Image: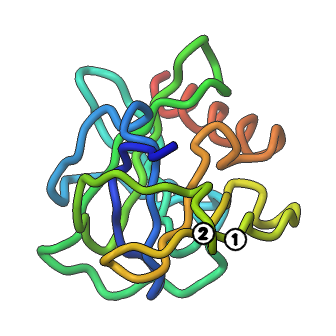
Amino acid sequence: MATLAVIWKSAGLVLAADASAVVEVLPPLAWRPTPCSPEFVRGLFAYRGTLIPLVDSARLLGAEPAPDRVSNRVLVLRTAVGPGPSWHVGVWVDAVLDLDRVDFDAAGSHPGFGTEAGRFLGPVARTRWGMVQLVKPDELFTPEQIEVLTQRLNGAAA
């Protein structure tokens, strides 16, 4: 069954998230760095009156981020893990490519590799954009990372 997905580029890869988890796609925006944060955290930004973490998707993938460009976007993702029933996080990506249906269960697809470091990476499917890997927003962060992110968030709001 095909998934309606937002498709983007980061760290030289083409990735996708189920469109139901994408709250909004924003142009590059003002954000505040948070010193001494984990490497994957760019900082915090104001989203609809609330400060939320901005994470760098390249860093989450273990890569060096590309230089900032006007093509960068921020995906505001809804996750089921965090300091409430629905928690938002901003994900900095190189560019958003498309909104398209992708069949991650199609013949010839690959289930992905189940490693702890890549826990948020799902199956890979072939599309007109090349090979696209599904990102699972609910598994982006470990419980320890969520604790650090929410502490930073609570500290910045004080």
Q: Residue 149: x and y, percent?
A: 63, 40
What residue does disc 2 label?
Answer: 124
Q: Amino acid at mark 1?
A: His
Q: Amino acid at mark 2?
A: Val
**Label 1 – label 2 distance at C-alpha:** 5 Å
Q: Is residue 62 above or below residue 109?
A: below
Label placed on residue 56:
none
Tag 1 and tag 2, C-beta contact below 8 Å? yes
Q: Residue 92: x and y, percent?
A: 37, 61
What residue does disc 1 label?
Answer: 110
Quadrant for residue 37, please give it. bottom right
| Residue at the extreme front | 107
Q: Nearer the viewer, residue 36 or 127?
A: 127
Give the secondary structure at mark 2: strand
Q: Residue 101: x and y, percent?
A: 34, 51
Q: Nearer the viewer, residue 111 or 70?
A: 111
Give the secondary structure at mark 1: loop
Q: Which residue sits at x=21%, y=53%?
A: 30
- Report the side of 103 relative to 110 (left or right): left
Quadrant for residue 137, please give it. top right
Q: Earlier in the sequence, mark 1 or mark 2?
A: 1
Q: Residues within 10 Å of mark 1 (few under 14, many from 20)?
A: some
Q: Residues within 10 Å of mark 2 (few under 14, many from 20)?
A: many
Q: Residue 133: x and y, percent?
A: 55, 67
